[in-house]
Amino acid sequence: MLKLFKYGHRCNSLTFLRLTSIERKKIPIVSEDLHDYLFKNVSRSPLDKNRYIIENVEIPELPKLYSEGNILKHFELLGKEMNMTYDNYLLKAFEMNDIPKMPEEWNFDVGWTKYDLINNCPKKVDYPEDDFLIFDVEVCVKDGRLPTLAVALSSNGWYSWCSERLIKNTPVPPYSKINHLIPLESSNGNNKEKVVIGHNISFDRSRVKEQYYDHPSKTAFWDTMSMAIAMYSVSDSQTTFYDKKDYNIAVHSEHSWLEKWKESVTKYNLKDLYNFLVPLDDEKRINIDKVARDLFIEGDIEQIRDEFQYLTNYCANDVLATLHVYQKMYKEFMYRFPSEITRYGMIKMANVYLPINQYWHTFQEHCDNDSKEVTSGLHIKNTYEKDPWMFDCDWSNDKNLHLPKWFLNCFPKVKGKNLDDAEIKLRSNELPKVFGVCYGIYPIHFIKNYGWGYLKPIERNGILPKKLPVFDVYNIPEKEILNVINDNIKKGMSEQEEKNKPVGRVGSFLFYRLPHPTNGAGNVGAIFSKSYQSLFESKILTPTRGTEIANSIINDLIKTMYWVSFRKRFEDELPIWKDDKCDNGVIAPSVVPAGTITRRSTHKLWLTATSAKKDIIGSNLKSLVQAPQGYKIVGADVDSQEQWLAAIMGDSIRKDKYIGDSLFSYLVLMGNKNEGTDLHTVVAKQSGISRNVAKILNYARLYGSGPTHAASVLIKHNIPENQAKELAQKTFEKTKGKLGVYLELNQKYKEFFLPWYKNTKEKSDWESLVFVNNRVFVKISDEVNKKLDRNIVRDEFVKYARTSLTNDIPNSEMENFNLLLNSIYKDCFKNTQYKLFYGGIESDTFNFLNLILDEPELRTPVLKCKLGNGFHPRPKYSVGSLQFLNYFKRSITNWVIQSSAVDFLHMLLLNMEWLCQKYNIDARFCISIHDEVRYLVKDDDVHRAALALNLSNLMVRGAISQALGIYQIPYTTAFFSLVDIDTILRKEVNEVVTRPDQTTVESGVALTYDEVFEKTQGKLSN
């Protein structure tokens, strides 16, 4: 009977989404030869010449893939090959059941001692020769940052290591050298691959000798803390939920998910993680004593020496605990992160290697001197007690940042932020005092619970209101306040008519509230706001010392903030010097390879330091990383990485799966700022806002921000609240689109439903359809907040079938026909409702992100990494699952994009290492800072390394595209826009950087792909 459902008009393919007046141009893509290299053996649609144009690009030497014509399979096989040995050792560590007995007494001797498996007899060894080790290092903090003792464990026995300082009481060395560190490999250079496992292993790695050699070690460091963070940790925004005690779910039903959620997450320090993973009745369970740790932090070397056996046992117990948590996490981690590429990437991300030179020594002294010079000019601190405005400010220093607390209150969320980037908080109660604001002739003053007001002298013989409260203000400088009033009178400033009665008394003054813009007698919370702009313009509110104080306090302190914030972090680094003059050294910083839930690497200094900024003391810190003679630092920024990922995700759910099919993707690939066709300009024009504001909103929206947040951003840019809300809603409708209720069309009715829908509905209805792979979602209603009582689309379809086909049905078939109509009525659509977007520039991307939330397990599209418990949606229909999703949906969608960006980076590092090995390119991984990678490369190989980076970018983008079902590579993203070749670490090669000796570092070189090809003739081989 289904053959009866025909429609006279042919169902054409989807047209391009047209939401603006932008005329689409053909998208330049790489040649067929490159497409065949990547996708030849993959089933794909022929090239659509109406959409794309072949770009005439030079083809480089192409290495043979592990799977020819299938780039995704190549990466899978390459990951297995490159990580095979390390994976085997990780498996061995997991399978180690017979744990050697811990020694009853530890050998008090310099260097390594191995303890016999049978009787624990100590034997001196040069280093542990085992394939894998569980490892922990302890440091006497009062001595500095060099290792004091260490313990290691393998299936072959226990090991301990002691420093010469601990055993022989040698002096603390003035400079750290390689021979002060812990050897883990043979000194003859014949080293094999091994794995060293530890909790926060990057701290221990920084104290391992071979990590500072000129040629990279084959030892891989595996971090159990990163495993825990990726699976079980909570974000900063969730900490308040995690720390809630005795929470009454009956009262707070919106948190009904909390109890079950807390059972699935933990803090990632070793003790908390151990208690989370190891049951109390586990026969292997040990007691973790963290009291001993305080001796390493607060005790001196003599105390550690006296407590040697106790403290070495403590270290050994940490090793045992690390093994336990590793074995508890191993299977789950392998399930959640199945790709060898992920494990390779985590190992590589920890192997950071930063060359430094003699400027490291003088940098701190130089910054300290500059900072003192600036702050010495802040004479107001010595006289603030007599200042008419700032006498009651908190001038005590913050214990961490060593700056006046009142000053830090001028900035939002100062803690952990680069203060040079912080925007001034205009609602701060300190700011009007800094600028000495007066209302008419009277200085303004702030009183808690009363807001802003002004101080007017009590007239002699004046009659005071009865029961006027007296505000207790300590040491008010009455004489100085009167002087300000008299000076203002002399300047011809006018006294304002009192609109309110005084609300209190402050010393010899009456306190009047400032007039409230809407409620005359209400409290005024902020005067640097839109509401009071007219009072400033009419000189009723006047800053009396704007230039003087702004220059002497705000600007000067901002100059010092960066260095104040980063000075301790700088001191905590461990530079290791290779020569007696300390002219050449290396830092192997303690980078956590997966330090966030999104699996981004973290480091408190190197991954948070900003680019050099003029007059900001210490901001050129990154430039201290300087290539030694004969080498260059070569690297690139992944162009618009997260925008490209978001765009291609949107394309992947379009009907035809073409790159650039969605308007968002097209704008990312083809948008031109100069032509006014880039995403930010298009959104700005459609929403009536500036391009800069549109750019802020675009990135915020990409990471899950909603209209409310967008409105708050607009308000900060001096747009009135009502207008801001209207603009935010308009912007979201143009970009994200409108939200509708969707149902999935049953597959067996698709070929009949779609022609009917296309020919009977409005064009906008047809364009609102959502195609995901072979699935079709149909908008049933715009009322997303109402219960769906009726499926009008289904009813109309059934009605069409009944009325148009009844006459063609013979009476003998009428019963079957009615049964069929009933079946369509029941089964045409599946039951699950979806809230999806339509009609917006970015609708496809956000629909991809919304639909991925419906999966039982939320994983990245490429390497299939699973979201950790902290943010993973609760099981469908479980208690509180919807409330949980409402709380954290923004963070979850953010994770999909950012964690996919980490997949991109891991794949790039893997492929780059393969090419460098294959073609003998002398390139060593230096560091990755979010979307950029840097390598230390021998001068003779810099251009081949630049070509390898470009080819790796092409191959990674090809693999990600293939994973999402897309087989076109646009020329604009195929290669890096520029590859930097430089002598120092900096964001841009032409960034002006001044050394501590006041000389300027020469600019580096930034090469396009064509320039790299010209210099190498496209050859990776020598």
Image (cartoon, grey):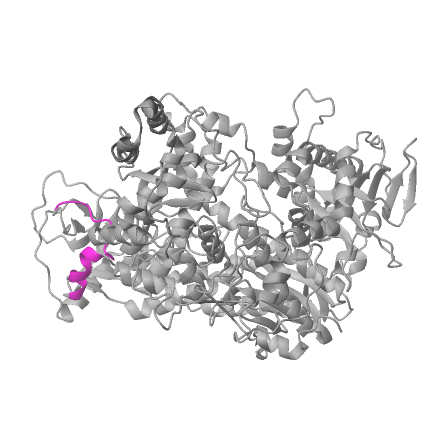
Look at the image and tell me in which quarter the N terminus lies: top left
Relative depth, front residue between 964 and 821: 821
Q: Residue at x 40, y 69 (%)?
A: 672
- 530 in the magenta segment: yes
Relative depth, front residue between 272 and 786: 786
| Whether residue 350 is visible | no
376 is higher (above) or lower (below) than 702: below
> What's the magenta region?
521-537
Left or right: residue 321 versus residue 641 is: right
329 is higher (above) or lower (below) than 910: above
Q: Position of residue 524 (x, y in %)?
A: 20, 49
Q: Position of residue 190 (x, y in %)?
A: 87, 57
- 407 in the magenta segment: no
Q: Position of residue 751 (x, y in %)?
A: 40, 41
Look at the image and tell me in which quarter the C terminus lies: bottom right
Q: Position of residue 11 (x, y in %)?
A: 37, 48
Left or right: residue 316 versus residue 357 is: right
Residue 406: image quadrant is: bottom left
Q: Residue at x 40, y 52 (%)?
A: 13
Left or right: residue 183 versus residue 608 is: right
Please tell me how many numbered marks the rendered image carries: 0
192 is higher (above) or lower (below) than 28: above
866 is higher (above) or lower (below) than 1005: above
